[in-house]
Image (tube, helix red, strand yellow):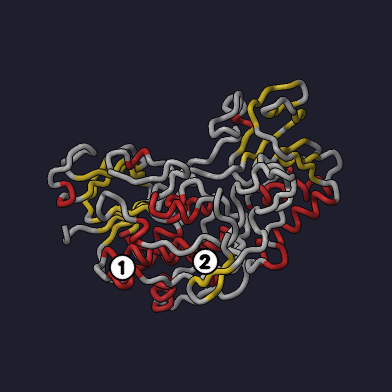
Amino acid sequence: MSELPVVVIGAGPQGLAAAAHLNERGVDFVVIEQGAGAGAAVAEWQQVRLFSAWPELIDAAARRLLEALGWVAPVEGYPKGAQWVSEYLEPLAASFGERVRYGETVTGVSRQGRDKVVSTGRAQQPFVVHTQDSSGRDGRILARAVIDASGTWNLPNPAGADGFPAVGERAAADRVSYRIPDDVAELAGAHAVVVGAGHSAVHAVLQVAALARRTPGTRVTWLLRRGDAARIAGGGAGDELPERAALGQLAQKAIDEGTVEVMTGFRLAEVASGDQGLVLRAEGGREVSGVAQVFALTGFRPDTEMLRELRLDLDPLLDAVAGIADEIDPNIHSCGSVGATGARQLAQPEKDFFIVGAKSYGRAPTFLALTGYEQVRSVVAHLAGDYEAAARNDLVLPDTGVCGGAVDFDPADGTGAGGCCAPQPTLQIGLRPVAVG
């Protein structure tokens, strides 16, 4: 199998970073991307500004490769998704030439001649990566190892609070969006509802709130499943990601000035059609009526259907890689408590198969590009036989880590105490102390 390539699934930030590390170590590889270009998922939210600065968005091996080709790394500012693609991901993918294959969907990963049940000689067989191109033609690639960096973008969570679409949610598909809006002008004078508590939801709320300030009659309702809105502003002035802090503070300002109405503890059960628009009903009977558009921004979940013939160890709670689940569980951890994970934690029962990036985190909302870059650095070192480098921790995170989670879902005293972004003790990770929950 040493003659076979490593197959990387996905040409997003983590997939291309894996390619850069494989290239640097002289390991043959192929990247399979179902989109038409590098960073296809990022391109779908190209209008959104990241809250990480340029230095935190560039993988170290990718930087070394590109700078050797004359590329000059951006050093200041917070790019939008479009800039991240055009100024970094596209040049990086172009440097690999035909080793990045676009317009191909991975439909399955298995062991050659072995389904999931067969154990005899399993580890000695190469992987078979099954693909289908845009014309419907099937293909097979034999691989010595597989790195799944396909992300979670294509499987957003529903608006329904119990993990399934609310009654009527599918029927109202033309008025329920699971993406951050690009242009909300058509909602002038209408009532828009945002469901969700993460940064995507905040972006949507701010866009519609800006429209409401310009256009009388425009309404914005923000539905939160959790019991209070105390943590919307995130880490505040103490946040080492200032763009993230600013995002939360702008949302709080919109609420304080009355531009945005917040309803907490609203767990959507039904979407119905009314005379004046959609009617959203919560468990318990509360309603929001006259809704023209719903933005359901409640996170994502991993699609593991293509991995059904592999032996995997996934956490039953988060759908995350089991080896990292305890470190990222949003029911336990608050800001900053998510540290580095590498090949040891990401290892699967299926030898030399690794899930990395946002997909490795399952449904946990605590993923950063930096944590993904550290994952692929460690995994590639392991595959190259450099076990010392694979075990090393090179990650440095901002002090406040990542905000989110469900720790204050139902605060007993109504204050949200103990929730994300409350003051935390610190733990030394890498070169910098970070907060832990």
Q: Is residue 93 above or below residue 283?
A: below
Q: Quadrant of the N terminus?
A: bottom left
Q: Residues within 10 Å of mark 1 (few under 14, many from 20)?
A: many
Q: Residue at x 65, y 34 (%)?
A: 267
- Residue 237's x, y, as percent? 72, 67
Numbered badge on residue 381 = 1
Which residue position holds label 2? 57
- Which element carries disc 1, helix, strand or loop? helix
How many other residues sit within 10 Å of disc 2, few (<14), some (14-19) or many (≥20)? some
Q: At x 74% / y 49%, what residue is drawn?
A: 415
Residue at 47% in and 56% down: 327
The quadrant the C terminus occupies is bottom right
222 sits to left or right of 299 = right
Along the line of sight, which residue is nearer the eye, 14 or 166?
166
The image quadrant of residue 278 is top right
Q: Secondary structure at mark 2?
A: loop
The residue drawn where x is 54% and y is 31% is: 164
91 left or right, relative to 221: left
Residue 132 appears in the picture as rendered: no
Q: Nearer the viewer, residue 161 or 316?
A: 316
Q: CA distance from mark 2 to mark 1?
A: 21 Å
> In this rendering, is residue 425 above or below 150?
below
- Mark 2 vs 1: CB contact within 8 A: no
Q: Nearer the viewer, mark 2 or mark 1?
A: 1
Which residue lies most toward the front here? 413
Question: Looking at the rendering, which quadrant does residue 137 occupy?
Answer: top left
